[in-house]
Image (tube, helix red, strand yellow):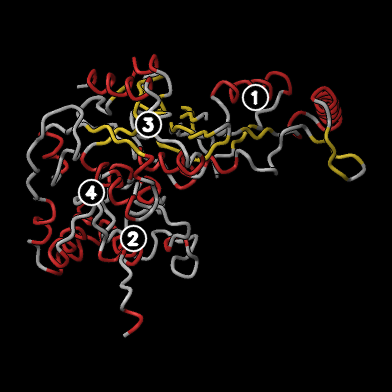
Amino acid sequence: MDYRTVLTTCTYCGCGCNFFLEVLDGKAVGTIPCKTSPVNEGKLCIKGWNVHEFIHNEKRLKKPLLRKNGKLEEASWDEALDFTAARLKEIKEKSGPDSIGFLTSAKVTNEENYVLQKFARAAVNTNNVDHCARL
Amino acid sequence: MIDSIKDKVKELLETGEIQGFLGLVRKNGHIAPHLFQKGEELRDMSLGDNIIAGDSRYPLNKYLMNIAKAYPEETFGVLVRGCDDRGLQALYTWNQLNPKKVLAVGITCPQDLADACECLQPYPENITAGDCAKAGAQKSVAAIDALVLSERFSYWMDEFVKCIKCYGCSNICPMCFCNECSLKCDDLVKSGELPPEIPVFHHTRAMHMVGRCVDCGLCEEACPSGIPLRTLYKKVGSIMDDKFDFKTGMIRGQRSPLNKIDSTEGKK
């Protein structure tokens, strides 16, 4: 018997609500909003309340996929990164840096967002950075 | 008070009387529900008082139901205040927990918490630690009842319109255990509409709290819009008391008038 309440932060938006995932024998079975969190004070929105439901979903993306012959196939990280880097370079050389745009996410950390905009501006030389806040 | 609880739980775990104790722990700077299985874990136990008494209460009975469903043969201990104890008694009558498999360890609430909650019984039946406070004065329902009908109606409509339909009131509720929820039935409550149809949405939930609400107040604490749900359900409770002489969970084994099937009824 293994019952744990695991403190974590909501991945749905940038508010940063804290909750405990109720984990019974390795499976997340519930979400418990954290009352001592200064961010959400024991409250959540409907998405936060149901956040445990996607964890074990079979449709979750766990490995990189590459489209080969019109079909998405699993690929290694090295293969996926090599492909992406090569295509970005090719597009930049052919059509210029402003032909490329970057969409970042509210579901990642501040630092990860910083890294992406830095990559867009310093490595690719474009200010085309936008964000998925229109959830 | 906490030392008496720790001693009691340690004894229960060591004698093997219980396989685990569902209580609260202070970890990562927060107070969290926790299943204690070893004596040494008790060092960081909490009773749910962070800044003020009872500000970090959680519906432990609700989590106990999840664990008990997976391990129906095991006996578990659970930390209870007056409201949790009433909840346990009611859950037994609704066959959601087996009283033979639950061992409640009771604490009392201090007077300031009893007053803030307007709690009718701020202590469990069996007390392991603490002194009994007096029942809190009933003010919130009386204040709204004192308004004339049109003002009372506007008061509630102005509150209900703030609803963001997070279902937090139902998700946190230790007495919400139905497999199918009317509030999630598409024919009754249209999905994708905000606020939900008022006052029907809130009245539907209030009706379902009849004979069930144990007045723990966790719904109001979980409401992001600050709707005074506790006052609404206190009113429901007071009607049950007036009309049926029934207070949920106060008398052991007493079933709600709505949880009785009269065996002679069908034969008439």
Mark 1 against mark 2, which lies toward the viewer?
A: 2
> Badge 2, how many Cα within 10 Å: few under 14, some, many 20+?
some
Q: Quadrant of the N terminus of chain B?
A: top left
According to the image, label 4 marks what residue? B215
Q: Earlier in the sequence, mark 3 or mark 4?
A: 3
Furthest residue to the bottom?
B268
Secondary element type, mark 3: strand
Q: Is residue B134 visible?
A: yes
**Amino acid type indicated by mark 2:** Arg
Q: Residue at x 49, y 33 (%)?
A: A21
Q: Earlier in the sequence, mark 2 or mark 3?
A: 3
Query: Chain under label 1?
Result: A
From this viewpoint, is residue B228 visible? no
Q: Do the numbered discs 1 and 3 sit on residues whose CB atoms are within 8 Å?
A: no
Placement of the C terminus of chain B among the 4 image quadrants: bottom left
Residue that numbered label 2 is attached to: B205
Q: Amino acid at mark 4?
A: Asp
Measure the C-alpha gap from mark 1 to mark 4: 49 Å
Are dots 2 and 3 on a single chain?
A: yes
Picture coordinates of residue B58, whole percent (x, y): 33, 36
Gap between marks 1 and 2, in whole Å? Answer: 46 Å
Closer to the eye: label 2 or 4: 4
| Residue B78 placement (x, y as % from top left) | 33, 34
Mark 2 lies on a secondary structure that is helix
Identify the residue position indicated by label 3 in the image.
B22
**Residue at 9% in and 55% down:** B143
Horizontal relation, residue B187 to residue A64: left or right: left
Q: Is residue B255 left or right of residue A78?
A: left
Which residue: 29% across, 42% down? B221
Disc 3 marks which amino acid?
Leu
Q: Chain of mark 3?
A: B
